[in-house]
Structures are given as structure tokens and as C-alpha cells.
Image: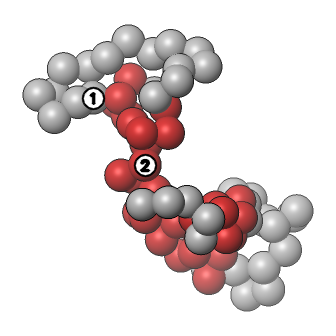
Amino acid sequence: MNNLTKNKNKKSEKYEKNRDAMYEILASMQPKAIKNANNLLEQYDRSYPANDNPSTTVHLLVQQLNIFVRK
């Protein structure tokens, strides 16, 4: 997790459970994470996330929730 919380000055911030700013820290990485998840699902002939490993469809939920986020 420390690699994900590096700021622009490349100084690593200490990981803190239940951090208030975690969304803001990770938000810029969200488009790439969604793209990677879509690519992974496309690799399966017939996607069945409960049995596919690794697989998840949480990115579909995130995309729907993003509709309601004010920018």
C-alpha cells in the first residue's frame, strides 16, 4: 500500500488504516484500475466471476456510482 500513497515528491506516506483521504489518494488511479478489470474480464471465454480467478465485477459498480459523484 505504501507504493500507492506516494505523493508527487516521491516521498512515501505512512499507511494508516481507515484513512480519511484514501479516496482522494487513489482516485487518480481509478480509470486505469477499471480499464485493467475490463481487460481481465474480456480474457475469459464466458465470464463467470464467482469461478474465474482472478476476477471481480466491482469495477462495474464503481462505474455506476461514479455517475452520482460531483466533479
- Mark with earlier residue (2, 1): 1
**Residue at 61% across, 80% down:** 43
In the rendered structure, the answer to whether residue 53 lies left or right of residue 59 reads right
- Residue 26's place in the image compared with 48, above or below, is above
Q: Residue furthest left?
A: 9
Q: Is mark 1 on a helix, strand or loop?
A: loop
Q: How many labels does the image show?
A: 2
Quarter in which the C terminus is drawn = bottom left
**Residue at 65% across, 75% down:** 41
Q: Label 1 near label 2: C-beta < 8 Å?
A: no
Q: Where is residue 64 in the image (x, y as percent from the top left)?
A: 67, 70
Can residue 55 be seen here? The reply is: no
In the rendered structure, the answer to whether residue 32 lies left or right of residue 58 reads left
Which residue in the structure is indicated by mark 1?
6
Residue 27 badge = 2
Q: Is mark 2 on a helix, strand or loop?
A: helix
